[in-house]
């Protein structure tokens, strides 16, 4: 959508965007845009366009930071960010549906950056088509800070409620609070699974070094068995959002917790309303189950791993290390 009260400029911008293959809605006033959005049957735009101008290339990576009304950092981007690229071989749909993140350009000239109105995913969380960003932000007052060549410029930003939505501010805040909890716990679980993968690889390498040392090989095998709590998930599998169940009486492995937390997050963020009682109850139970699994994983690292590393050092071999 292009909103511009200068007719010739509106026509020029719309024509350029159409030549780029985009569908364009041209509006000569803010009220015309609001009227159009209020009557449209499709989803409202789910992003904010942030335009900026650079006189010259910044000697250091430029940064774009978004803060909420309290000054808390909501999202941060940099021109040297490593951007996620969707693997088309893992997509259940055509790539026409995919919107991979675009770079924050550090070049002279006028640029446009698109923020998807989401918080960031915690580091290490596995992305998929159904799960590509953190929680939605809530309507309110925000500020955008652009830093280039050591100089910063700040601009206010107001995110308004979808005029068709009947959700209250309290309901959306409740939704955000639960989504943030699910996202944070998912980040912890994902980090633990990454550690497990690294440790499993390190054990395989150390077993080669310990060839012929029967007791040491047995200790490495025993540590590997202790890691059943973090059995590596199928690297090619996609998270599913159906068939969710509450944690069983048995202790849940970390991959199962990861899958459940992901599904709950997707469901919780699928509508602009407070989470249902069932979703809230399931989230609480899976959060507790994930916490228990994480505690057991930390015990493996602090106790079992320490014992094996002591044995490795006595055999003049490098200890097992993870990040």
Image: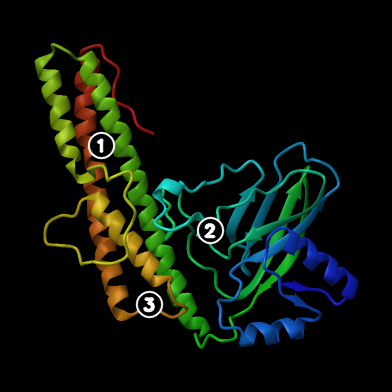
Q: Quadrant of residue 141?
A: bottom right
For the residues carrying marks 1 and 3, which lies nearer the camera in this image? 3
Q: Quadrant of residue 316?
A: top left
Pinpoint residue 319: horizontal percent, then vertical percent: 29, 22
For the residues carrying marks 2 and 3, which lies nearer the camera in this image? 2
Reading the image, the residue beneath label 3 is 275
Distance of label 2 from label 3 (alpha carbons) = 31 Å
User: Is residue 299 rendered to the left or right of residue 269?
Assistant: left
Distance of label 1 from label 3 (alpha carbons) = 37 Å
C-beta proximity under 8 Å, tags 1 and 3: no
User: Is residue 48 rendered to the left or right of residue 53?
Assistant: left
Q: Earlier in the sequence, mark 1 or mark 2?
A: 2
Mark seen at residue 302: 1
Q: Is residue 321 above or below residue 18?
A: above
Mark 2 residue element: helix
Reading the image, the residue beneath label 2 is 96
Q: Is residue 191 above or below residue 117?
A: above
* Residue drawn at (56%, 78%) of the image: 42
* Residue drawn at (33%, 56%) of the image: 239
Q: Earlier in the sequence, mark 1 or mark 3?
A: 3
User: Is residue 100 rendered to the left or right of residue 62?
Assistant: left
Pinpoint residue 124: horizontal percent, then vertical percent: 42, 46
Mark seen at residue 27: none
Mark 3 residue element: loop
Pinpoint residue 288: horizontal percent, then vertical percent: 25, 61
* Residue drawn at (48%, 60%) of the image: 134
Which class describes the residues within 10 Å of circle 1: few (<14), some (14-19), or many (20+)?
few
User: Is residue 111 rendered to the left or right of residue 187?
Assistant: right
């Amino acid at each position: 959508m292009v909103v511009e009260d200068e007719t010739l400029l509106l026509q020029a911008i719309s024509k350029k965007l159409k030549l780029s293959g985009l569908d364009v809605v041209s509006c000569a006033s803010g009220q015309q845009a609001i009227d159009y959005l209020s009557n449209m049957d499709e989803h409202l735009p789910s992003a904010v366009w942030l335009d900026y101008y650079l006189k010259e290339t910044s000697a250091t990576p430029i940064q774009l930071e978004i803060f909420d009304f309290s000054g808390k950092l909501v999202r941060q981007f940099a021109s040297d960010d490593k951007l996620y690229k969707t693997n088309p071989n893992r997509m259940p749909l055509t790539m026409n549906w995919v919107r991979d993140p675009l770079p924050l350009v550090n070049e002279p000239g006028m640029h446009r950056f698109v923020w998807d109105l989401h918080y960031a995913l915690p580091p290490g969380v596995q992305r998929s088509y159904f799960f590509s960003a953190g929680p939605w932000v809530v309507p309110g007052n925000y500020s955008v800070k652009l830093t280039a060549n050591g100089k910063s410029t700040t601009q206010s930003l107001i995110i308004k409620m979808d005029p068709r939505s009947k959700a209250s501010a309290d309901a959306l805040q409740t939704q955000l609070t639960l989504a943030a909890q699910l996202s944070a716990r998912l980040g912890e679980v994902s980090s633990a699974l990454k550690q497990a993968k690294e440790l499993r690889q390190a054990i395989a390498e150390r077993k080669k070094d310990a060839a012929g040392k029967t007791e040491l090989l047995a200790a490495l095998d025993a540590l590997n068995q202790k890691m059943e709590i973090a059995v590596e998930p199928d690297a090619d599998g996609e998270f599913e959002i159906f068939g969710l169940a509450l944690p069983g009486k048995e202790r849940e492995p970390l991959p199962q917790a990861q899958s459940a937390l992901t599904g709950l997050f997707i469901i919780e963020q699928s509508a602009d309303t407070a989470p249902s009682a069932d979703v809230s109850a399931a989230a609480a139970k899976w959060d507790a189950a994930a916490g228990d699994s994480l505690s057991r994983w930390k015990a493996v690292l602090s106790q079992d791993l320490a014992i094996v590393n002591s044995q490795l050092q006595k055999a003049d071999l490098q200890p097992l290390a993870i990040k």
